Image (cartoon, grey):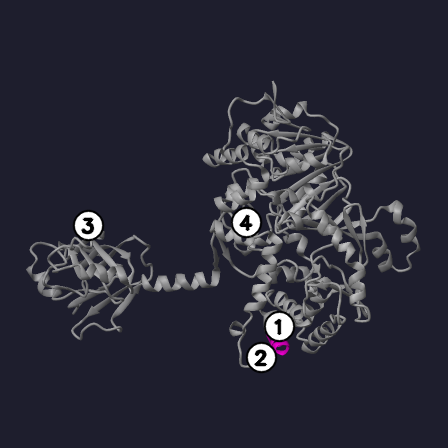
Amino acid sequence: MTEKIGGITIDDTCYPGKDLYCDGEIEDRILEIVKNHEPAGYGKIIEEERSWPVLYHLSHLRENIVNWIPVQKTDKVLEVGSGCGAITGALSVKAGEVTCVELSKKRSLINVYRHPQCDNVTIKLGNFQDVEPALDSDYDYIFLIGVFEYAGNYIGGNAPFETFMGIMQKHLAKGGRLIIAIENRFGLKYWAGCKEDHLGTYFDSIEGYPRSNGVRTFTRKELEEICKVNGISEYHFYYPYPDYKFMTTVYSDERLPKIGELSDNMRNFDRDRLLLFDEKNVFDSLIREEMFPSFSNSYLLVVGRELPVIYAKFSNDRAPEYAIRTEIRRCDRNAVGDAVERAGSEVEKERKALEVRKIPLTEKAQVHVGRIADTYQALEKAYRGSGLKINRCRMDGTEAVFEYLPGQTLEELLDRALEEGDRERFLQLFYQFRDVVKYPDHPSVYHYDLIFSNIIIDGPVWNLIDYEWVSDQKVTREELILRSLYCYGIGGDKRKKICLELIRQVKGWEETERWDEISLQEIVRRESAFQKHCTGNRMSMVEMRDAIGCAVIPAVSFAGACREQEHRNRIQIYEDYGDGFSEVNSCFLLNGYGEKELLSIEIEEKPGLQAIRLDPSLDYCMVRMKSFQVWGQSLSLRDINIKLNGKLISDQTVVFATQDPNIAVFHLMEMKNRIPGPGALREGRDGAIRDICLKVELEVIRISREMAESIVAGITDKNQGIRRGVPWFQK
């Protein structure tokens, strides 16, 4: 049976009659949102809701993973596991026909109501194994975005992942592509302290999934082996960053990340995480050792022909009028073939075979992109004779096309100088930058974004490769240099140190001033205003992560806090043999309390032992004595032989408004002689039977100083309870 809702057709022929999985009430909320709001309003709702599921299912940034893939209107597309439609709309816009397979009807309804205009989409409801036999065998693209890892749950046999890939191959047209987006189980984020995406546990994937429930991800080598089992020899890896869910940049083996590029790593939206090390620094080391592909957080595996795009960067976490995508792609061979053949060197051939494109992602952004090409001539005139060459730009329809320029960015060269400790080289490069950014007396345009990463140096030639942010609003040379230093300096401590020195030079500040004391407010204010202008005053993804509220716990400080906590929760026991209590005759019980952990203590009779002091914590606390026995006899804390430096709430409960709480038992031998009958006995390690002079079961509850002092202040007498004004403990 089929029905049409809006433009989308739903085929429930294989639907089992009820959803076999659901995320609960949050799906009802998302359905309510898409029924009652236009997609243009989702961004505001996401900010208001501050909910990971709402962000995950409704953010337009989810489309980035497929938007750069060259699907054409002549193409026929299959999307398996379409869910709430995170990428369905993008595929519908690009393709001629889209077929979705989805088990959940509620999620499919969310997909339908958020894409009412997509009249080229059909959703087939039901279990994949039930739907699959009726699927066509001529799809130009098949997309498995966050789906392949679940094959173990719905594909039978001993090799479900190999089987699943083989099944997908049968439904591809000749020359078609299978696209798989999946986490890398060796992704650096997991080593750095993020929880495994599917299980919510630390280190499960890198340990080989010892606790897996059927869901698993793969290393690059493992994915290659699955391809080979299916006889697939043509496949290509791409590397979505920070991951495939909210990808901002995708790399390829032809254009891997450069040192300094991978700095956006705090993307734990759904769970708290540890921070075991600085991921940027480790990524830089991996890049330097050519090991990045093994530790990329996610993979996008293309089974079939390689894609023409070797690099794509999305700048659509912005206001619609500035939302663009930057690509490095291979040129049309027919258009440039002769030029490539005529090129003399390998570098020149590479230069001719590749091009850079800036592509508007909204209709409003077309004006912004068009303005880039319009400013080329003005910038060339402004910097003529400065030593800074402006990269050529032309328009191809709505897209701005730049010449691909080989070389290294100024940022890369500065970083290398820092790593090598070559201060002289660093300063030489900076001073040269300072010299080449001179304006004429009255330029027609000013370039605000002349940061180090936008300059490529090829031998003696300095090239400005990106001039997206150009206007007629005056930017002084000092402002330009200060912003460049500021943007570079926030990338790490090494950078910050030398940038401080150079900012002092530019501003004429005294050497005695520290970085955190320098008046950078105006630079920061300008940068904040610029970023808010770009984003349309919307939350950035960093701000959204903070708003959702998942903690980032630095491992070093956490370990220190644990050590401090362990110290505070240690139980110290003093024994008096006639000379009073002293540290010499004391010991710690190192297995301290948890928040409410019951602890049992037994102390056997020893020759000459006259008194025992028990320090239950090294902090403010409340202690409940579950059992307090001296020579096998239960005693109250009010016994005249028991002294404590806290205030009694009841016979067995005491509050300590001190960081040195203690309970002491005196006159042990006199008490033994007064207690009738045998006491508690215990067999010692040597086999001898000894009396137990003290046996205690207690519970410690850590409280704040303020609470401890408040409770104590509310006690009128040690033999009376708490005043009505302090009812906290009466519960």
Q: In which quarter of the image is residue 416?
A: bottom right
- The amino acid on which the numbered mark 4 sits, given as a three-letter code, is Glu
Using the image, tell me which numbered label, if any, was put on residue 730.
3
Q: Name the residue under label 1.
A: 499
**Disc 3 to disc 2: CB gap under 8 Å:** no
Residue 173 among those drawn in magenta: no
Q: Which residue is drawn at 76% across and 44% down?
A: 307
Q: Which of marks 3 and 2 is in front?
A: 2
Question: Considering only order in the chain, which callout, 4 or 3, is on the residue closer to the N terminus?
Answer: 4
Q: Name the residue under label 2.
A: 509
- The amino acid on which the numbered mark 2 sits, given as a three-letter code, is Trp
Q: Is mark 2 on a helix, strand or loop?
A: loop
Question: Considering only order in the chain, which callout, 1 or 2, is on the residue closer to the N terminus?
Answer: 1
Residue 573 image position (x, y, % from top left): 25, 65
Q: Nearer the viewer, mark 4 or mark 2?
A: 2
Question: Considering only order in the chain, which callout, 4 or 1, is on the residue closer to the N terminus?
Answer: 4
Query: Does the image show residue 686?
Result: no
Question: What span is in magenta?
Answer: 500-507
Q: In which quarter of the image is residue 300?
A: top right
The N terminus sits in image quarter = top right
The reply, left or right, for residue 607 in relation to residue 259 is left
**Disc 1 to disc 4: CB gap under 8 Å:** no
Residue 253, placed above or below residue 78: below
Using the image, tell me which numbered label, if any, was put on residue 207.
4
